[in-house]
């Protein structure tokens, strides 16, 4: 069996303080961090602090904010060195970047994901323009020295991550499978209040989510954990294997008032028709 404490969007670059791990959650098998943990490489420092507290694997995907105020390849190179040092010293911090890791009998496949800008049929071009004009990622992230992140970089990263997750899921695995991404994978996770009015008004949602169940419904995925929108919704999709639970649990920004649950547990061995611990169904 495997039980995971699952947090996303800790945004410690704003809070300056990590949530405490509730005593009732100290027996989990691992901590999942769904991205936007901190900036300038400090996500690793936070992961190390949490590893010290929990003494169990800390498994994370990077969000878009991990790259803020950094040059992407420089951040990744430094991250690789520091991660190796931390783990050589006894920590167990695992970063998923299109690969998978195993805890108990559960495989976790993960990557940042980004989005395909194709959330609403026929709206790709407006989505591309609106997302490029409205999201801070393009001014805050440098994809290489002297070059800001572009919308083409964004799409390239999305397809690379999406293909990697798909290819990883194609590998046979005798156990439960979970997916963790920072960006959202199904439209059902967009809050209805974010889809009020004409599509032109809310096409920016394509910067938060893609709708890729059609591609991934052929897999037996117990749960898909994501962050990014800070909306903390859940959704269920059904296929021949039963159900896939789409879940989120973001702390968000200070004063944003997110419905963050520091005790949010994903248990991959609960029967599909039973309630997960944490949030009740909202859709
Ligand atoms: Fe976030
Ligand atoms: Fe984000």
Image (spheres, rainbow, N blue to C red):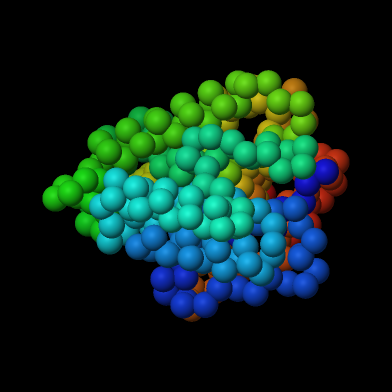
Out of 62 and 79, give the one closest to the viewer: 79
Give the residue at x 80% y 61%.
Answer: 27
For the point 66% across and 25% down, which residue is it? 219
Is residue 186 at all visible to an observer of this figure? no
Name the residue furthest front: 89
171 relative to 24 in the view: left or right: left
220 or 256: nearer the eye?
Answer: 220
Q: Quadrant of residue 158?
A: top left
- The image shows a total of numbered marks equal to 0
| Whole-percent x, y for residue 155 in the image | 33, 35
Q: Quadrant of residue 125?
A: top left
Compared across the picture, whether 123 is left or right of 224 comes to: left
Residue 177 place in picture, x, y as percent = 69, 35
In the displayed structure, 220 sits above or below 226; it is above
Above-or-below relation of 193 to 181: below
- Quarter of the image for the N terminus: give it: top right
Query: Is residue 275 at least partly visible in the picture?
Result: yes
Q: Position of residue 14 (x, y in %)?
A: 42, 74
Q: Which residue is drawn at the image coordinates 25% and 46% (left, top)?
A: 143
Q: Position of residue 55 (x, y in %)?
A: 69, 62
The answer to whether 88 is drawn above or below residue 54 in the figure is above
């Amino acid at each position: 069996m495997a039980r995971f404490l699952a947090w996303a969007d800790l945004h410690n670059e704003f809070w300056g303080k990590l949530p405490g791990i509730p005593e009732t959650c100290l027996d989990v098998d691992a901590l999942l961090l769904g991205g936007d943990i901190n900036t300038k490489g400090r996500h690793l420092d936070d992961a190390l602090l949490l590893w010290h507290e929990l003494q169990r694997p800390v498994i994370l995907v990077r969000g878009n904010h991990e790259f803020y105020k950094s040059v992407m390849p420089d951040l990744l190179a430094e991250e690789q060195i520091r991660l190796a040092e931390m783990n050589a010293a006894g920590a167990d911090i695992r970063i998923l970047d299109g690969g998978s890791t195993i805890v108990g009998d559960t495989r976790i496949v993960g990557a940042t994901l980004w989005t395909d800008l194709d959330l609403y049929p026929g709206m790709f071009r407006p989505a591309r323009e609106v997302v490029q004009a409205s999201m801070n990622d393009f001014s805050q992230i440098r994809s290489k020295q002297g070059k800001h992140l572009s919308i083409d970089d964004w799409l390239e990263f999305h397809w690379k991550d999406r293909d990697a997750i798909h290819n990883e899921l194609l590998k046979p695995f005798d156990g439960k499978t979970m997916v963790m991404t920072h960006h959202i994978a199904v439209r059902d996770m967009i809050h209805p209040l974010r889809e009020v009015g004409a599509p032109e008004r809310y096409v920016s949602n394509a910067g938060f989510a893609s709708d890729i169940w059609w591609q991934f419904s052929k897999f037996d995925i117990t749960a898909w954990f994501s962050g990014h929108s800070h909306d903390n919704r859940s959704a269920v999709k059904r296929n021949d294997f039963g159900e896939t639970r789409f879940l989120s649990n973001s702390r968000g920004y200070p004063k944003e008032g997110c419905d963050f649950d520091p005790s949010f547990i994903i248990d991959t061995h609960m029967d599909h028709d039973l309630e997960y611990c944490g949030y009740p169904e909202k859709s």
